[in-house]
Image: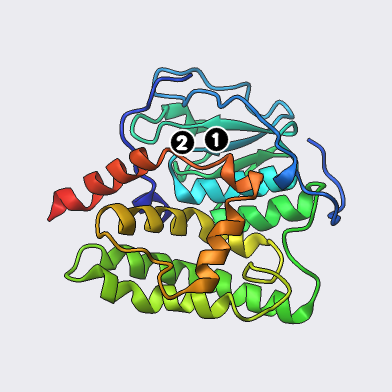
Amino acid sequence: METTFCIRLPPLPSTPSVGIRRRTKSMATAGVDELKPPSLTSTSDPPPLFDGTTRLYTSYVCPFAQRAWIARNYKGQQDNIKLVPIDLQNRPAWYKEKVYPENKVPSLEHNGKVLGESLDLIKYIDANFEGPALFPDDPAKKEFGEQLLSYSDTFIRDVYSSLKVEDPVKRTSPSFDYLENALGKFDDGPFFLGQFSGVDVAYAPFTERFQIVFSEVFKHDITEGRPKLRAWFEELNKNDAYVKTKADPQELLDIFKKRFLAQQ
């Protein structure tokens, strides 16, 4: 599934500290700026692999890769986890041969091994790097969080599949209603588990894209009649850990049109 939806257009011109999890002031609001390195292509040389550097192999327009990128930012690990963006339309052969045989993103090179799968990486980054915790200790929140993470693939699949059929607004209404109801579970904050967590990280990249597509293509606001979802978007866009990973909306829209509308 991660390969299916991580598509992109030709690239635009380019303009290890391990420790204990702790709840402290997050880099989410610290305003850390970093230069985005250019995406590596089939003609790019590999970095010095397995030299002790922790690397997050990503794509600037892949929502699955964006999950791990947000988690890395929220933990404040910009200096310790190096971004290595891959051009998914023109991937370097060495990435599959020497880094990650699955040949998809995200993947994380850490302590001499490479790990993948975006939901697993959210948890791995949270557990193995210092910074504010992405998952609460409260048992009820932990249980509900796992339910929401398990549902995320179903949510993504249902919405994407509905984009190809008649009346996608009506077809996707139950999926967005599910999010609205889930956001009402806890009343100590505007996020899924009250406070910002790995669950928000898991859903944010996809709802971001859905909001753009429904607004621009179907002329529909997915937050209409869903005040909790609207508040969630508003608070999410105050979070630097997330905001600094957002792609250009027009590029996301172009990708959608190429992926879906061209097939109709």
Q: Is residue 253 left or right of residue 28?
A: left
Q: Assign a secondary structure to mark 1.
A: helix
Q: Assign a secondary structure to mark 2.
A: helix
On the image, the x and y values in percent for residue 170 come to 27, 76
Q: Residue at x 80, y 53 (%)?
A: 132
Numbered badge on residue 96: 2
- Whether 80 is drawn above or below 23: the answer is above
On the image, the x and y values in percent for residue 193 come to 67, 71
Q: Residue at x 44, y 45 (%)?
A: 62
Task: Confirm or deny contact between disc 2 and disc 1 (CB under 8 A).
Answer: yes
The image quadrant where one finds the C terminus is: bottom left
The image quadrant where one finds the N terminus is: bottom left
On the image, the x and y values in percent for residue 41 come to 41, 24
Foreground of the two, 257 or 5: 257
> How does the figure colour the protein chain or chains?
rainbow
Foreground of the two, 223 or 7: 223
Q: Residue at x 23, y 44 (%)?
A: 258
Give the spatial CA distance, label 2 vs label 1. Answer: 6 Å
Q: Residue at x 81, y 48 (%)?
A: 131
Q: Is residue 211 visible?
A: yes
Mark 1 crowd level (few <14, some 14–19, many ≥20, 10 Å Cα): many
Q: Is residue 119 visible?
A: no
Mark 2 crowd level (few <14, some 14–19, many ≥20, 10 Å Cα): few
- Which kind of residue does numbered mark 2 sit on? Lys
Which residue position holds label 1? 99
- Which kind of residue does numbered mark 1 sit on? Val
Foreground of the two, 2 or 195: 195
